[in-house]
Amino acid sequence: MSNNKRGRRKEEKLWKFLKLIAPGTPLGQGLKIILQADRGGLIVAGGNTEKVLSVAEGGFKVNCYLTPASLAELAKMDGAIVLSKDTKRILYANTQLVPDYLISTTERGTRHRAAERMAKQTNCPVIAISQSRRVITLYQGKTKYVLKSILELMSEANQALQTLERYRAAFNEILIGLELLEFQDEVRLIDVIKAIQRGEMIKRIKEEVERDIVELGEEARLIEMQVKEIVGNTSNESEQIIQDYVKGNYKTAFLELEEISTEKLLETPDIMHILGYGTDAENLDLSVSPRGYRILSKIPHLPQGVVKNVVSALGNLPNIMNSTVLELTKIKEVGERRANSIKRELEQLKDKAFLGKP
């Protein structure tokens, strides 16, 4: 397994837990009350597992549903609070955590050292609340994450939205140009790579905003709506561009594209290699023809199964454009009525492309 895949899995676990402690959730509200009261705390999720119970001593059994008030009240005690894995129940309170002291830690405070060691030993999420710094730190496995304030998150998300808007506008311009070149059958490999780079960057910026949305919880409703409006169908467009031009399996190429770093994404040789065109810079000027998936998908009420049948039968967009209604009717699931519709819609799309309309 690649380092990127491992990193993604760790990140997925972290963001999954962040959803449980976001503003508006019972746990998130409880943490807010603890911070406002200038108190510290240590909370472990996953207390119904043997790993956690084996390193938790003393305290008393609670076994009640978690509410913000009950969590804040129990945090007044010196010991740790142990929650169920789904964080819905408080299992134990005022417990002493005794993880292996030989486990390395970069923390200095007693509470945070115990939290980091506990997370590394049990691989369960551990929350440390600093009374002096008024900061909440989440530990899971070897991962450490310091929660940001709502003001910080909102500022970060708004900046990312502005960047997202700029990339989306640039992507639209590239698509308009690419569509014209496709109908003229004058696409070069560099044109395709530019479109793929922009589309993938939009996806990655969107993921960054979504992380802030997760952490903001109910405070992020407006931002979530803005992201959906800006991004639109970018993901589908990007995938169809890859499907149109990749030499091998497009799903494999799509996954490989997700795995490369942002630095590599901005370098043309890596994209060329993923698409199956080698890494020679001279190949950037290669003339390439789209299969036609993206353009055909723009035709209203045309099922994806029919799109695949048309592409399989005719091979690429130039052949599809030059085909007759009779030739189209010979393709599976394409009758005379649908064939006429395909020809008519393609001509309209071509006219729009020549007029520079999206």
Image (tube, rainbow, N blue to C red):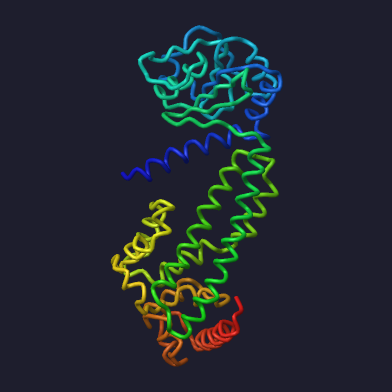
Give coordinates of residue 129: x percent, y percent: 59, 21
Q: Nearer the viewer, residue 249 or 90?
A: 249
Q: Indicate whether 165 appears above or below 338.
A: above
- Decide if residue 100 is on the left or right side of residue 84: left
Q: Point out the residue furthest to the top here.
A: 58
Does residue 150 appear left or right of residue 124 in this picture?
Answer: right
Q: In which quarter of the image is residue 319?
A: bottom left
User: With 5 as the anchor, is 63 left or right in this view?
Assistant: right
Name the image quarter holding the C terminus.
Answer: bottom right
Name the foreground residue: 240 vs 289.
289
Place residue 274 in its image quadrant.
bottom left
Residue 76, quarter of the rendered image: top right
Residue 59: x and y, percent?
54, 8
Which residue lies at the image location 43% right of the left edge and 90% below the top edge? 323
- In the displayed image of the protein, which residue is found farthest to the front? 281
The relative height of residue 84 versus residue 172 in the rendered view (above or below) is above
Decide if residue 231 is on the left or right side of residue 243.
right
The residue located at (32%, 63%) in the rendering is 273
Q: Residue at the location (60% across, 62% down)?
A: 232
Quarter the N terminus occupies: top left
Where does the image place residue 70, in percent across and percent down from the top left?
Answer: 67, 19
The front one of 166 and 100 is: 166
Q: Where is residue 199 in the image (x, y as percent from the top left)?
A: 50, 62
